[in-house]
Image: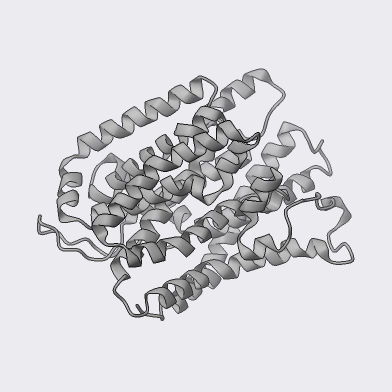
C-alpha cells in the first residue's frame, strides 16, 4: 500500500502539512509484521511447555489488525474530510478504492472459487479444501464476516484474513455519507459517542449471547470505535489548535501510550491477552485502539526522534508499501508450504508448521514486491487519474 496522503493545511505555527507522512508507511509495516508473526510463529502451539511459555510474549501480536483499523480510519477519514466539498466526492472515492482493492482481492476470490468446480484441480498432495458453512457469495459481497459471526466459524483457513477487509468495506459504505452530511463539530461528537458506545455494545453481546465474543471480533459495529479513533486522529492533525497541542504535548502522548501499554500487558499477564477473551473484548480492544492512535499521532506530529527514525527505516517502510498483497495472500501461501513440507515431515509437528509459515512469509513478500511493481502501482496511478 502506498504512503498515507494528508492534504496541506496551514497551521498556526506556520508549518504546512506535506502530502505524505513517511513514518506511517513504517507504522503500516509494523501492522503487517505483527500479523505475519502471529500466523507464522505465535499462533502455532508447540508440544514443549517451555517453548509455549516463551512464545507467550507474542500473545498480543494478533492486534496488528487493530493497527490496520486505526490507520484505515485515519487514511480514509482524511481523504473524506479533505474532499467532502467536491462535486465528484462519492464517484472518485469509490473508483479509487475499487482500483486499489478489487483486482488483487478478485484474484484471491477466484482462486477460492475453484473449489466449487465439478472436478478437483489441486494436486492430491495439497489436500482437499476443508468444508465451510460460510457461503461462497459472501466473499463477493464483502459480507463474509457477518456469516462467520452467524455460524461461529472462520470458514476456509486460506480466506480467514478477509473478514477484516469486509469490516473496512462496510466502513467505506457508511463513512463517506456521515462525513458529507454532518458538520465538523457534530462529526467529532458523533465519533466520540461511537468510541464510548461501542464497548458497551460489546459488553451486551458478551453477556447476552453464547458466541458473543466471536461476533464482537468480526462485526463492523463492534470494531467501529477503533476506526472512529482513526478518523478523530485525522481531524486532529487538520486542526491548527490540536496540531500545536500534538507538537507540544509529546510527553503527554507518550505518557498516555505508556499507561495503555501497561494495561494491555497486565491483561496479557493475567491470561486475557487472547483476541476473544472477555476482558479483552469488552475494553481491551478500546485500549489497543487508543494505544495505536497515540502512536499514530506521535508518528504524524513529531518530525524527529527515536520513534520516527525507527518507523522511517527502509525495511519497515517497504514492508508497509507491500502490506495489502502480503495480508491477502500470506495465509494461503503458508498453508501451501506447510503441505509441501508435510510430504517429508509430520504435518502437525511444530517444525513443519513453523518452517512452512516462515518460508510462506518470505515467498509472500517476494510475490507482493512483484505485485506492487507490475500490478498495484500502475492500477493506483490509473485510479488517481480520476480527480476530486
- Foreground pick, 356 / 158: 158
- Foreground pick, 194 / 121: 194
Residue 277: which quarter of the image? Answer: top right
The image shows residue 375 at horizontal and vertical percentages of 55, 71
The answer to whether residue 310 of the structure is visible from this angle is: no
Residue 16: which quarter of the image? Answer: bottom left
On screen, 123 above or below 95? above
Task: Count every numbered label the image shows and give the total.
Answer: 0
Residue 49: which quarter of the image? Answer: top right
The image shows residue 332 at horizontal and vertical percentages of 69, 53
Quarter of the picture containing the C terminus is bottom left
The image shows residue 231 at horizontal and vertical percentages of 35, 54
Q: Residue at x 69, y 27 (%)?
A: 46
- Foreground pick, 156 / 198: 198
On screen, 91 above or below 170? below
On screen, 322 above or below 85? above
Q: Residue at x 49, y 43 (%)?
A: 64
The image shows residue 184 at horizontal and vertical percentages of 26, 59
Q: Residue at x 57, y 57 (%)?
A: 166
Q: Residue at x 29, y 33 (%)?
A: 256
Amino acid at each position: 500500500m502506498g504512503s498515507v496522503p494528508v492534504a496541506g493545511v496551514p497551521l498556526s505555527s506556520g508549518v504546512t502539512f506535506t502530502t505524505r507522512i513517511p513514518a506511517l508507511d513504517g507504522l503500516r509495516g509494523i501492522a503487517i509484521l505483527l500479523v505475519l508473526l502471529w500466523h507464522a510463529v505465535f499462533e502455532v502451539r508447540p508440544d514443549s511447555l517451555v517453548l509455549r511459555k516463551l512464545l507467550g510474549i507474542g500473545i498480543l501480536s494478533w492486534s496488528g489488525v487493530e493497527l490496520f483499523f486505526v490507520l484505515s480510519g485515519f487514511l480514509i477519514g482524511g481523504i473524506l474530510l479533505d474532499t467532502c466539498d467536491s462535486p465528484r466526492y462519492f464517484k472518485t472515492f469509490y473508483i479509487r478504492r475499487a482500483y486499489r482493492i478489487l483486482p488483487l482481492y478478485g484474484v484471491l476470490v477466484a482462486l477460492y472459487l475453484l473449489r466449487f468446480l465439478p472436478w478437483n484441480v489441486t494436486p492430491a498432495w495439497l489436500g482437499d479444501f476443508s468444508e465451510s458453512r460460510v457461503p461462497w457469495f459472501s466473499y463477493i459481497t464483502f459480507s463474509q464476516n457477518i456469516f462467520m459471526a452467524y455460524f461461529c466459524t472462520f470458514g476456509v483457513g486460506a480466506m480467514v484474513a478477509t473478514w477484516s477487509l469486509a469490516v473496512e468495506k462496510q466502513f467505506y459504505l457508511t463513512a463517506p455519507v456521515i462525513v458529507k452530511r454532518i458538520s465538523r463539530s457534530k462529526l467529532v461528537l458523533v465519533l466520540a459517542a461511537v468510541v464510548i458506545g461501542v464497548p458497551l455494545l460489546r459488553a451486551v453481546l458478551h453477556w447476552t449471547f453464547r458466541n458473543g465474543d466471536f461476533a464482537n471480533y468480526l462485526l463492523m459495529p463492534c470494531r467501529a470505535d477503533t476506526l472512529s479513533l482513526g478518523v478523530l486522529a485525522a481531524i486532529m492533525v487538520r486542526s491548527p489548535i490540536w496540531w500545536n497541542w500534538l507538537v507540544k504535548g509529546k510527553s503527554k502522548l507518550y505518557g498516555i501510550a505508556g499507561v495503555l501499554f501497561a494495561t494491555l500487558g497486565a491483561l496479557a499477564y493475567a491470561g486475557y491477552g487472547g483476541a476473544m477473551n472477555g476482558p479483552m473484548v469488552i475494553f481491551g480492544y478500546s485500549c489497543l485502539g487508543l494505544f495505536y492512535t497515540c502512536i499514530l499521532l506521535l508518528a504524524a506530529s513529531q518530525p524527529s526522534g527515536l520513534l520516527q527514525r525507527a518507523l522511517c527505516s527502509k525495511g519497515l517502510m517497504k514492508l508497509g508499501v507491500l502490506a495489502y498483497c502480503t495480508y491477502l495472500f500470506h495465509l494461503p501461501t503458508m498453508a501451501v508450504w506447510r503441505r509441501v513440507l508435510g510430504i517429508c515431515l509430520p504435518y502437525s509437528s511444530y517444525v513443519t508448521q513453523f518452517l512452512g509459515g516462515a518460508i510462506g512469509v518470505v515467498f509472500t513478500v517476494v510475490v507482493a514486491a512483484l505485485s506492487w511493481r507490475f500490478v498495484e502501482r500502475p492500477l493506483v496511478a490509473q485510479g488517481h487519474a480520476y480527480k476530486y
